[in-house]
Amino acid sequence: MSDVFDLSNPVPTSSSPSVSSAKPETILDRLKANLSKKVERPLQRIEVPERPSVSVQFDPNITQQQLKAWRKQAGEGTSKDGIDAAKFSLIVVSQTCRGIFLDDEQVYSEEGAPLTFASPEIKAWLDADTPTRAVVALFGVEPHVQAACVAILDAAGFGDSVDTVEDPLKDS
């Protein structure tokens, strides 16, 4: 009887691609992968209470630099009376707006850009010369603007609490 060898299915060796020579993933590798992902909060929508079917989309990813600049624009450090809370709210709402929706459908300009408080169409329709005046005109009631500001800052994480985690290696 002769020996017949089937070479179409070779036995894997350490140099063949079917044998994995990769090191198993370590906790250090997993942490590196986790830290390489950008932390970003999703866009949020807020309904305009006095305008049924209208909502405004906001970006809650606010940096400390942005917040500091907005507070300064609202009078912090520049006015003897301090920060103007109403003006601060208007700035936050106007600066974080990323879109306006009607009946859950985002509205775009004729050029295809999402409408915001800075859009010429919105300012014209609301008879407003600035984005902040457009905010007041759209919301209609200043307390609703301030409530929207609080909702945006909460969505950004400024109202979050951070819990401590018990150390499992600490002696009880």
Image (cartoon, rainbow, N blue to C red):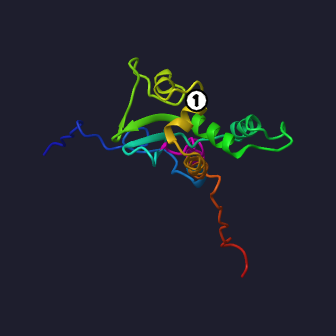
As drawn, the residue found furthest toward the right would be 80
Q: Secondary structure at mark 1?
A: helix
Where does the image place residue 15, in percent across and percent down from the top left?
43, 38
Total numbered circles: 1
- Position of residue 142 relative to residue 108, above or below, is below
Q: Which residues are magenta?
A: 32-44
Image point (36%, 43%), residue name:
53
Q: Name above or below for residue 76 compared with residue 151.
A: above
Q: Amino acid at mark 1?
A: Pro
From the viewer's perspective, is 19 left or right of 77?
Answer: left
**Residue reaching furthest to the left:** 1
Q: Image check: 9 left or right of 100?
A: left
**Majority SS type along the magenta span:** loop
Q: Write the residue at 78% across / 38% down.
A: 75
Q: Nearer the viewer, residue 113 or 74?
A: 74
**Local crowd at mark 1 within 10 Å, few (<14), some, or many (≥20)?**
many
- Would you say residue 124 sits in the magenta stretch? no
Which of the two residues, 24 or 35, is positioned nearer the viewer here? 35
Please state, as top left, top right, bottom left or bottom right, where the C terminus lies in the image: bottom right
Q: Is residue 8 left or right of residue 83?
A: left
Q: Could you tell me residue 49's position as x and y percent? A: 45, 49
Residue found farthest to the top: 111
Q: Residue 27 at what x, y percent from top left?
A: 58, 55
> Quarter-wise, where is residue 130 in the image?
top right
Q: Name the residue carrying label 1.
A: 131
Q: Is residue 86 left or right of residue 55?
A: right
For image coordinates 60% across by 51% down, the residue present is 150
| Residue 37 is one of the magenta-drawn residues | yes
Expressed as whole percent of the image width and height from the top left, the position of residue 65 reads 72, 37
